Amino acid sequence: MIAFVALPILIPFVLIITLLIIRSDKLARWVGPLGAGLLILLSVYLLVLVREHGVIALQMGGWEAPFGITLVVDYLSALMLVVSAIIIFSIAVYALRFLPETIKLNRFFIFFFGLTMGLNGAFVTGDVFNLFVWFEVMLMSSFVLITLGRTKNQLEGGIKYMALNLVGSMFFLAGVGLLYGKTGTLNMAHLAEILKNDDQAILMNTSAVLFFVAFGIKAAVFPLYFWLPASYHTPNITISSLFAGLLTKVGVYTFIRFFTLFFVHDPQFWHQLLLVIAGLTMVAGGMAAAAHYETRRILSYHIISQIGYMIMGLGIFTPLAIAGAVFFTIHNMVAKTNTFLVSGMINKARGTYELKDVGGLFNQSPLMAVLFVIPAFALAGAPPISGFFAKFILIKAGIENGNYGITAVAVLTGMLTLYSMIKIWNEAFLKKQPENEYAKTPFKKLQFAEYFPSVLLGAVSILMGIFAFYVFDFTMEAGAQLTNPELYIETVLKRVNP
Amino acid sequence: MEIILAIVVGVLYTAGVYLMLRRSILKFIIGLILLSNATNLLVFLSAGLVPGSPAFVKPDGVGNGVMADPLPQALVLTAIVIGLGIVVFTLALKYKFFELTGTDDLDQLKKTDD
């Protein structure tokens, strides 16, 4: 039963081997979505296990905790696993219809599951160096995915994406080195235990700052985000939406993990820094999104803006705020991916991403309009869809803890979000189709299979809003576990047997 | 010995950053290689150097007293392999880009910005 913890890594691995052997696009059509569906079942089962035991840990190869590699699933990991599995499934279905002929489906799914493996590995690992390895697995797959179409723009975007992310990896590895030099361990729980009772823990700041820069680059926070808008709009929309939903959120996950579990020695400095960065990230991303007129660029900048909210929750650092950050992260993963999916549909129906060249979609396809409104309202924070509760929790936590500055920034950035969403709505759906070359091509009716992924994610967003009480319950448990990591440490170091 | 290696790490980082700030993509990649090697050396140094006593244990389980810490060496080995894979991919990407555009100038990469 505990061995199930290794499956989020093993299933994608087995799928990659299968795809390498079968080498057929026809079979890959089935293997991709079915494999992704299996991941959903598995991650829901893991969430149920976590509900029973609190934290579950698996010692790989039978080596005891500080010496071997530990895989750990707690509430945060389990929630991230479930939500990313849902996104992976919907994108596996989306890919069947939206990938161009030039990209072989079989090859796409190999790297798609490579990315999934790295992602799930990063979520379940309890070892800092192991986390580095999973990051690299994920990065390598994403490098291949982003350049899969081999056009000029994709290669250019790929170079920028790769360059900054590799510099981030170097920071990460240097941080690992210094961390090991100072503590002699890389097991996260062991680190937490050592640093908890160490009066010289302030010396950890040198490593912490290296990790901060590394995760800052991965999560695309304020001064380090420039790779994201330069690359996310270049690949095929399937790949853009995959990246938009998952990649930066891993950076946020590691931020939350590291800065709640063991870099808690100097809260005055770090939480202040996190809050400042969060505010700047929100505003910078929101402003840039407001200035653009290409859907993918608007949405890319908007990813950055939303990262700020997640970091804000971490910076406030009360159980409620962490719960808000987790809620916001899972809500945002779903809604953000969904907006990208809809922009892909607009492109498929009209042949362009430029908002100035499209219009009148509301009359052409009311269903598409509804599908856009759901994630857009979720992102803008309108009740009763998921985003309202996520923002509400964060703002409540901010006011309760007296962080009025960041709370004001968060509320005002909500306006910027609303503005960019209304812009897409007005331009693409309400205004008349301008007379241009795109108007002459007949509107391409989409089939249900093309709508389905977006319908699924939209339903998840709405359900997360209607049953917000239950989701909040889970995230609150996550917040409690993260701010008081005793159980995590004890379980990993084998002092309690689940 | 540690002092010398520390200086080597510093020099490698300096050279790497300098090369990364040049305009050529190829020099950028060479800079990346230097950075990755500097980082590998840093990790290798992190447990300190213990010359002449490898981490072997006698059959009865008794060690040789002070032993070199094998873990950073294992980490570095992994990091070197990952670095190799990344450099190969970067070079392939750079080659493909050069084939398509005929430029090696980072200042020409402005199309996807703004």
Image (tube, grey):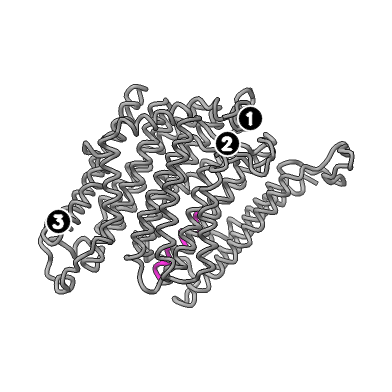
For residue B37, side relative to residue A121 (left or right): right
How far across and how far down the image is residue A279, in percent?
Answer: 36, 37
Instruction: Say what secondary structure mark 2 lies in.
Output: strand
Disc nearer the start of the sequence (3/1): 3
Residue A144 against residue A224 in the figure, above or below: below
Q: Residues within 10 Å of mark 1 (few under 14, many from 20)?
A: some
Kindly indicate the quadrant of the structure image that contains residue B35. Answer: bottom right
Q: Which residue is mark 3?
A: A366
> Which residue was labeled with disc 1?
A494
Given the image, on which type of amino acid does mark 1 rest?
A: Lys
Image location (x, y in percent) of residue A330: 37, 41
- Single out the residue that lies furthest toward the front: A1
Proximity of marks 3 and 1: CB atoms separated by less than 8 Å: no
Q: Is residue A161 magenta?
A: yes
Q: Nearer the viewer, residue A101 or A14?
A: A14
Asked if residue A358 is among those painted magenta in the image, a careful observer would answer: no
Determine whether label 1 and label 2 are within 8 Å by CB.
yes
**Identity of the residue drawn at 22% across and 66% down:** A349
Residue A103, image quadrant:
bottom left
Answer yes or no: is residue A386 visible.
yes
Tell whether label 3 touches label 2 (CB within 8 Å). no
Q: Residue at x 30, y 30 (%)?
A: A469
The span shown in magenta is A152-165
Residue marked by disc 2 = A57
Name the kind of residue labelled 2 in the image: Ala
